């Protein structure tokens, strides 16, 4: 089966700044893929290129076996996105937000209502379904954005720093939702600079350093009986000063 996501030489340049430098990602279907990197490494730029918010400067990619240049609408129907800035409709209630998203995706009314009730209940938002998104706390806004992304039953989720600013209770709930999503055959591509979250959730990892992919693969293989923090620091510290970290890992 073709991977959920494959990129070939993906590159994004802003003037003299090379934000993403020719990366080749391979994200297996059904995996929980953690995309690691320090702040400014290029993680968010990569997601924006993959989700259509930015046009890549070079390279190509396929999502769920589809070419975005040809199958953009089909991809949109199969992909959910929670961007770092959330992009919520501030003057809509949570219930109205999900109704609007469901209508955009052409969901039947009974299916839309059932999924919306289930998601709002599971994410502990049912009691606040009639409140405006603008009045939600940061954690509630994150959960609403996740509910909107999950509503159309996507097969691939892009999540940009979904746990940033979330308290322990909210984090646990989101983790549970995402674990259930992957257990049901979905794929998650998650960016984060919080290593503990990635180590606890992900089975595959990619490490980005200054726009370059310096390692990727199954988490157990990358760690090699070390902690993820030790592995990450070794890879980032070696990048640019020693042999390629990909070669280092293979050796």
Image (cartoon, grey):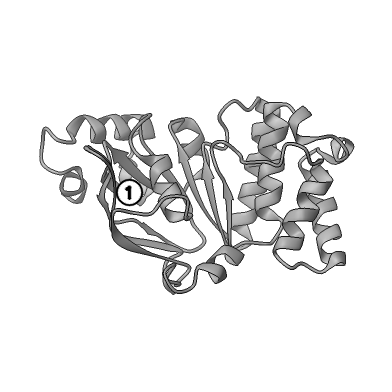
Residue 4, horizontal then vertical, whole percent: 46, 64
**Residue at 27% over, 37% down:** 209
**Residue at 66% over, 36% down:** 142
Q: Give the quadrant of the N terminus.
A: bottom left
Name the residue at the front extreme.
15
The secondary element bearing badge 1 is classed as helix
Q: Quadrant of residue 79?
A: bottom right
**Residue at 74% over, 31% down:** 134
Say if 122 sits above or below 230 in the image.
below
Residue 40, horizontal then vertical, whole percent: 35, 31
Residue 25 visible in image: yes
Choose between 68 and 124: the one closer to the eye: 68
Residue identified by numbered label 1: 221
Side of 119 where 49 appears, left or right:
left
Residue 8 visible in image: no
Say if 213 sits above or below 2 in the image.
above
Q: Quadrant of residue 3?
A: bottom left
**Residue at 33% over, 35% down:** 41
Residue 108, horizontal then vertical, whole percent: 81, 69
Choose between 106 and 236: the one closer to the eye: 106
């Amino acid at each position: 089966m073709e991977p959920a996501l494959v990129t070939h030489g993906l590159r994004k340049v802003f003037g003299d700044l090379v934000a993403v430098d020719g990366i080749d990602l391979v994200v297996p279907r059904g995996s929980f893929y953690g995309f690691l990197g320090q702040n400014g490494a290029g993680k968010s730029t990569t997601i924006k290129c993959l989700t259509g918010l930015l046009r890549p400067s070079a390279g190509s990619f396929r999502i769920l076996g589809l070419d975005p240049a040809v199958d953009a609408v089909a991809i949109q129907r199969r992909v959910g996105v929670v961007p770092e800035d959330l992009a919520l409709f501030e003057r809509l209630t949570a219930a109205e937000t999900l109704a609007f998203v469901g209508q955009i995706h052409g969901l039947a009314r009974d299916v839309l209502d059932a999924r919306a009730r289930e998601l709002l209940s599971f994410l502990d938002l049912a009691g606040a379904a009639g409140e405006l998104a603008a009045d939600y706390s940061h954690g509630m806004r994150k959960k609403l954005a996740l509910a909107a992304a999950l509503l159309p039953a996507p097969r691939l989720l892009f999540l940009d720093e979904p746990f940033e600013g979330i308290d322990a209770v909210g984090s646990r709930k989101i983790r549970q939702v995402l674990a259930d999503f992957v257990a049901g055959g979905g794929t998650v591509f998650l960016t984060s600079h919080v290593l503990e979250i990635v180590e606890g959730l992900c089975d595959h990892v990619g490490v980005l350093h200054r726009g370059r992919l310096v390692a990727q693969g199954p988490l157990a293989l990358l760690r090699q009986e070390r902690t993820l923090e030790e592995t990450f620091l070794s890879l980032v510290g070696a990048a640019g000063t020693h042999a390629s970290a990909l070669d280092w890992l293979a050796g």
